[in-house]
């Protein structure tokens, strides 16, 4: 690449219109020693870039990283377990606390705020209601006396049946002496 | 994703992360610490990786944010002396070591750039990323990236020429 072309590229470079490839061309051009005098003013910039491109870390980050990651993983698992354990204990404690809380909050039945007259009235009404219920129940049971009619009937039926038995036996004996 | 698979994916990025972090801290040790921090952050956020264009972009976003946060939190002080030493050390191995002063000068100029321009310059010139990728990493539009890059490059050129003219006159 001749000086003229480099000059054009250089102008484009400072306008930031060069492509990455063109910038590579420029950089390799300026590594040469025999460059035109009027281009030397910017040479050290490209040297510096070239030098910085070659910079590398001298530490084995892979090993360190693996160590850190696997350590973190174990620690994370441990923390998770601890968290579950702690939260289950917290849940149990909370449950007990809430039981105690609600139990103590259950207020005893407040003493009646009724006057003796009212209590008596309520008593009478309740007794009346219960009487009424028992009356109705008795009315239902009174109908059960009809069942008594069955008894004499069952007696005569039993008598007749034994009579029938005897007659059948007689007949049998006559036929089979 | 298992730890092994994860390592296989992120480890090729370690030098890129290292270089970007070194841009911020100008210190090898801090940059190495940043690599570990960034890897670890990537591991804890490995579910988010798919939502980015590439793992590289995601890693560089995390790196930049980590560096910015660290500098903000610690009021990180960049020592210029170490920086010069660093440059002088590595250039002495090059054949053009008589130019090491010039390299230090350019290095200082780069550090004078605002953070955004410096990062864009780094991602483009050192890492060779496309404007679209840089735009994603910095969550801005590609045109703005290009404008800022041009500004950064021109700033360095003008300063370099000014310094050279001054030295020329003095000689």
Image: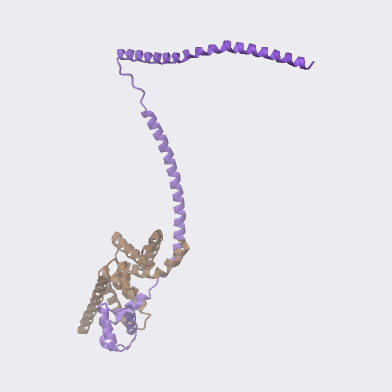
Residue at 37% x, 68% y is B56
Q: Which of the 4 image quadrants contains residue B7?
A: bottom left
Report x, y in % for residue A91: 42, 40
Report x, y in % for residue A129: 38, 15
Relative horizontal placement of residue A142, taking residue B124 as reference (left or right)? right
Relative horizontal placement of residue B165, taking residue A174 as reference (left or right)? left
Residue at 39% x, 29% y is A103
Camera-side residue of B79 and A133? A133
Residue A174 lies, with reference to residue A49, above or below; the image says above
Relative horizontal placement of residue B156, taking residue A75 as reference (left or right)? left
Quadrant that contains the N terminus of chain A: bottom left
Camera-side residue of A24 and B104? A24
Residue at 25% x, 82% y is A11
- Colour in which chain A is drawn: purple
Q: Which chain is brown?
A: B
Relative horizontal placement of residue A31, taking residue B151 as reference (left or right)? right
Q: Which of the 4 image quadrants contains residue A45?
A: bottom left
Camera-side residue of B113 and B93? B113
- Coloured how? by chain
Report x, y in % for residue B89: 36, 76
Q: Residue furthest right?
A: A177
Q: Can residue B37 be seen at all in this image of the molecule?
A: no
Report x, y in % for residue A115: 29, 15
Q: Which of the 4 image quadrants contains residue A16?
A: bottom left
Camera-side residue of A2 and B114? A2
Q: Can residue B20 be seen at all in this image of the molecule?
A: yes
Quadrant that contains the C terminus of chain A: top right
């Amino acid at each position: 690449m001749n000086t003229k072309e480099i000059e054009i590229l250089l102008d484009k470079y400072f306008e930031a219109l060069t492509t990455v490839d063109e910038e590579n061309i420029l950089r390799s051009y300026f590594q040469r020693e025999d460059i035109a005098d009027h281009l030397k003013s910017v040479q050290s910039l490209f040297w510096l870039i070239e030098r910085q491109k070659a910079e590398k870390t001298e530490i084995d980050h892979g090993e360190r990283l693996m160590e850190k990651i696997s350590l973190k993983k174990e620690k994370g698992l441990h923390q998770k377990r601890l968290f579950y354990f702690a939260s289950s204990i917290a849940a149990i404690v909370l449950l007990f606390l809430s039981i105690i809380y609600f139990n103590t909050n259950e207020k005893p039945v407040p003493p009646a705020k009724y006057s003796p007259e009212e209590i008596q009235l309520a008593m009478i009404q309740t007794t009346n209601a219960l009487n009424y219920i028992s009356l109705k129940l008795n009315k239902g049971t009174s109908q059960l006396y009809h069942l008594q009619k069955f008894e004499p009937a069952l007696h005569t039926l039993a008598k007749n049946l034994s009579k029938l038995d005897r007659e059948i036996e007689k007949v049998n004996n006559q036929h089979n002496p | 994703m298992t730890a092994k698979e994860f390592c296989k994916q992120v480890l090729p990025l370690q030098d890129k992360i290292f270089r970007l972090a070194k841009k911020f801290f100008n210190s090898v040790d801090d940059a190495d610490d940043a690599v570990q921090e960034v890897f670890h952050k990537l591991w804890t956020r490995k579910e988010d990786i798919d939502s980015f264009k590439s793992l590289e972009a995601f890693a560089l976003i995390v790196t930049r944010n980590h560096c910015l946060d660290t500098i903000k939190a610690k009021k990180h002080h960049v020592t210029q002396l170490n920086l010069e030493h660093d440059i002088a050390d590595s250039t002495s191995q090059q054949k053009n070591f008589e130019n090491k002063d010039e390299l230090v000068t350019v290095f200082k100029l780069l550090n004078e750039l605002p953070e955004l321009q410096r990062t864009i310059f780094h991602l483009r010139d050192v890492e060779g990323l496309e404007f679209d990728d840089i735009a994603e990493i910095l969550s801005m539009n590609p045109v703005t990236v290009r404008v800022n890059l041009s500004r950064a490059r021109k700033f360095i050129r003008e300063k370099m020429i000014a310094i050279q003219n001054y030295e020329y006159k003095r000689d």
